[in-house]
Image: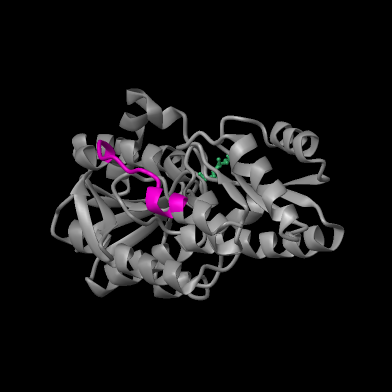
Amino acid sequence: VKKIGVLTSGGDSPGMNAAIRAVVRSAIDFEMDIVGIRRGYNGLINGDAVVLDSRSVSDIIQRGGTFLYTARCMEFMNPEGRQLGLEMAQKLGLDGLVVIGGDGSFRGAEKLSELGMPTVGIPGTIDNDIVCTEYSIGFDTACNIALEAVDRLRDTALSHEKCSLIEVMGRYAGHLALQVGVAAGATAVLVPEKVSDIEKDICEKIREGRSSGKTHYIVIVAEGYKDKIDDIAKLIETQTDISTRVTVLGHIQRGGSPTVMDRVIAARMGYRAVDLLRKGIGNRIVAIKNNEVVDYNINEALCMKKSIDLELCEICKSIAK
Ligand code: F6P
């Protein structure tokens, strides 16, 4: 019987619990023992482990967050920390490890694999910025949470004839902002991947809108955009004379019950990760390509390139009137 571990690392995302559940249940189905490592790589170093059975993952599929807790671990970035992690994994009798997280977490997974502990990564982040995969667990839920908030802000922006600027998360990437902006019918979306001209792309649109009877405006700003949202708001206000309001959505986007998409992808990825470890294959990241589950060598995966959907940027611009 093989024994594997599972941990969540980095920022949490809705659907991580569903992924842990899939890992645990498929491991048991493959007659493997499974332990949960709590608090990410910190827990691996400290031996913060708990034996999991089928019932220990009951009633978590619908919950946001991660019941194994998560952390960003500085110690694991250096060789000494990783050596301690490896020794603890060996002490726990692990034959493999599943790491659910983002790019930073996968670098740790790669190093562990190099040291002889087969490790498989599952992409989980609301930012959808993991370069090797079209999709990461949590993105759809975060988009929907942000969208609901923007819809509410639109009600009040409309009533008071204001321009509402809304900052969404995404770290250095604009995927979340773009999806939400298109779905919310925003006047403009500002993403880090493209420099926008506030005068041409927003102020002019507001003046044109005004002359055709439009009275309120929604602008989505990715947190990674080069200018501060308050400065952009002031500029719009002085250039167009419209009253502006700024809302930073923040961590509300990371919580909540995962959508169908996040739960199903979590199940598919969790199963694949365990299937790889069962065959003794490590140093892989599970990913989505053309809606199929695939897996890549970690080093190759981390060197891949991913850009923002430029066509969707154009569509967004074209239909925002
Ligand atoms: O990676 C997920 C994320 O929520 C990013 O969108 C954001 O930039 C970051 O984490 C915030 O991290 P923290 O909660 O540590 O401030």
Residue name at image x 75 percent, y 35 percent: 239
Vertical order, 64 against 47 (above or below): below
Instruction: Name the one closer to the observer, 84 or 247.
Output: 247
User: x, y percentage for residue 183?
Assistant: 55, 63
Q: Is residue 265 left or right of residue 260?
A: left
Instruction: Judge whether residue 68 can be spotted in this image.
Output: no
Q: Is residue 84 left or right of residue 283?
A: right
User: x, y percentage for residue 91?
Assistant: 30, 43
Residue name at image x 37 percent, y 40 percent: 103
Q: Is residue 116 magenta?
A: no
Vertical order, 200 against 184 (above or below): above
User: x, y percentage for residue 224?
Assistant: 55, 36
Q: Is residue 305 magenta?
A: yes
Which region is colored magenta? 302-314
Instruction: Name the one closer to the observer, 312 or 166.
Output: 312
Residue name at image x 44 percent, y 28 percent: 75
Q: Is residue 97 left or right of residue 226?
A: left
Residue name at image x 76 percent, y 50 percent: 163
Instruction: Name the one closer to the observer, 290 or 91.
Output: 290
User: x, y percentage for residue 263?
Assistant: 43, 70
Return the residue found at the far front: 211
Q: Quadrant of the N terminus?
A: bottom left
